[in-house]
Structures are given as structure tokens and as C-alpha cells.
Image: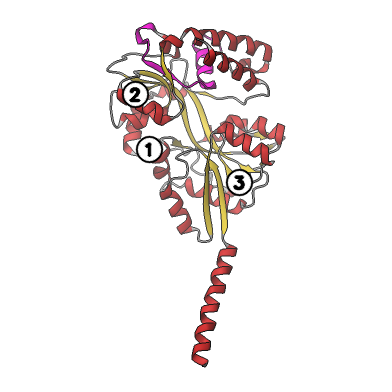
Amino acid sequence: MRKGTTIVAAVSGFALLARLDAASAETLRLLTWGGYAPDAVIRKFEAENPGIDVEVTLMNNEEMIAKLRATGGAGFDLAQPSHDRIYAAEVESGIYKPMDWGRIDQSDIAPNLIEAVRTNATVDGKVYAFPHQWGTSGLMADTAKAPGPHGWEDLCDPKYAGRTSMRLRRTILLGTAFAMGKDPFAAYADLDGYRTLMRQVGDKLVACKANVKTYWNGGDDLAALMLSGEVVLSETWDSTAFKLFGQNPNIRYVPPKTGALAWVDTFAIPAKGEADEAAYKWINFVLRPDIVPLMSESTGAVAALRNGIELMPADKRKALEASFSEQDLANMKFFANIPPGIEDIEGEVLDRIQAAN
């Protein structure tokens, strides 16, 4: 009897411990981009941090901000908006917590990216983000079929009629403005002036519709168009071009002569996040040099480390080196903070382009 009682007690004890372990387990709820939480990285993180489970929700900038605004910053523990999407959202809606940079290993982070994020994500002396990965938007060309493109305006060159593509989002508006010799970021301060500029940009892109085979929505859409040869020149994220370079070395990323548009995807902690300690552990983990290649393999983007390019997988590093000169890297145009009202103006222009015959 005592032996049976001991066994029952032991089993009950194990069950109790299992329940206690489950109760003490912490969930890190990530709100991030596709590719930014690959399974291999999650498995390694959870193995090194027993008791923390990672839950991933994938969204883009607009969706992230809308979700956090709707919940008042609740429902997630770590978000990854781009550096130009922090300031206005925080000022208007208070959806983030100030970041404690002292809890993050900064020793290997690229100084220019530290400065870019600090400048764009500071509100009332407090910083609300930290850099993770960077990349650019520019052109992608099948150089065997579209040799020598050098600027955004080439997307509307009649010689490529019916064989170009672009995404109907703000990037193409900004790139077209630069191609017209204007600095759209400098125009942010004057809403009326910006509205006038965007109308001019809209006119150009409406006139360009006959050149466009189709408007792409995601990287997979664009990859299929380029690999099939239906499209030979497109506006793109550099990471999409880098991935395709390994399949067809004629497909190259082309930084526009006016400067590739550069973004930094960040880490930001939602205002009502419940797992700050786990969030900082994740930040430090994915910025480690041994983890960065896994992340860059998944995203195609460059880690915010000084040697981020060197840590990219060989095929993507080769693609980047084939695309960017030192001058191109120095000429990048970092997206500027978006003041209230700017996106409304851009939305009206994009709707007009979409509706035009």
C-alpha cells in the first residue's frame, strides 16, 4: 500500500510541477514582418530561454500601427515598425514605452543606424525604438532585357512599355518626386506645398500606367513576375532583388541615381506589453553575430551591426556587393518622420492613380 501510495504521490507531484511550469511560462508576443521570426531562430531562442514561448503575428507598418492604436498598445510585447513610423504614432496615440537602451548590447551596432533611429524615434527626450535591420527601396532590372536603368523615371520609359511594375504605396510617390528633382522629405513641413507636389507626382504616374504590366503587392508576386520575364524592370525592396540574384544573376538591384530610399526596421515595446524582460532578451539574441546570418537568410535585409553586410549569407552578400558602390551607400536617403496629414494626402493620390484608366 505504501509503495502504491508513493507512486501515486510521485505522479501527482510531477503533474503539479508540470502545471506550475506551465503557469510560470511566459509568452513573448511578437508583432513583426514576414521573415523576421524564422522557425530556426525561434527554436534556438526558446532552447536558450526555457520558460519563454514565442508567439508571432505578421503585419506591415500600417497594420501594426492600426492594431496598436486600436488596443492602446495592448496585446503584444514587442513590435517592429520602421524608424519613420514611431514619432507620429507615439505623439498621437501613446502606443509605445520608452526603450531602455542600457539593457541592449550596443557594442557592435552601426553608429549611423543608432543616430538615424535616435533622431527619428525620440519624443520629449525619450527614445522609443532601437535598430534591428536595414534595407532600401529602389529598382530591380533583368539586365539582359533592360540594360542600363539608372533612375525611377526609367519605369515610365516607353521602351519598357508593358514590362514594368511598381507597388502602389508611398515609396513610388517619393521616388518619383526625387526623379522630378524635388525633395519630398523637405516638403513635409508645408502640407499645402506637399499636396501640390503629390498632385504633380500623381499626374506623372497616371500617365505612366500604360507602361505598367501590373502593380505588385508582395515580394512573392514580384519575384514570379521577374523570373517569368513578364516584367523586366520594377520598383522593389532590395531584399527581393538579392534573393532573385541567386536564381538569375542577370536580375540586379539598381540604386536610383537620386539615392536609394533607406529604412530601418526597429524594435519597439508596446505601451501595455507584459513581457519586457523577454522582449529585451529577444532583442539581444537576434542581434548576436551567430544569429544574424539566420535572420538575414530569412529576411534578405542587413543587420544593424557594423559588419552586418559581412554577416549576410554569401549569395545575398554577393548580390549586395554587385549592386551598391560606396557612393551608393553614402547617397542613401533615409525615410523621414511622417507628420500628421502626410499619409492622407498620399492616400488620395494613390487612390487616383489606381482609379485612372
**Going from the N terminus, do you reach mark 1 or mark 3 first?**
3
- Magenta residues span 158-182
Q: Position of residue 257 (x, y in %)?
A: 43, 15
Q: Position of residue 150 (x, y in %)?
A: 39, 14
Query: Is residue 355 visible to the viewer in this orientation of the structure?
Result: yes
Alpha carbon distance from label 1 to label 2: 27 Å
Q: Residue furthest toward the bottom?
A: 1
Label number found at residue 194:
none
Q: Is residue 329 above or below residue 64?
A: above
- Relative placement, left or right, of 243 versus 30 is left
Q: Nearer the viewer, mark 1 or mark 3?
A: 3
Q: Amino acid at mark 3?
A: Phe
Q: Magenta includes 165?
A: yes
Instruction: Kindly identify which residue carries mark 1.
Output: 310
**Going from the N terminus, do you reach mark 2 or mark 3 first?**
3
Q: Amino acid at mark 1?
A: Glu
**Going from the N terminus, do you reach mark 1 or mark 2 first?**
2
Instruction: Kindly identify which residue carries mark 2.
Output: 226
Write down the quadrant of residue 196 in the picture: top right
Q: Is residue 321 above or below residue 290?
A: above
Instruction: Kindly identify which residue carries mark 3.
Output: 76
Residue at (51% x, 8% y) in the render: 204
* Secondary structure category for the residue under label 1: loop
Write down the quadrant of residue 219 in the picture: top left
Q: Amino acid at mark 2?
A: Met
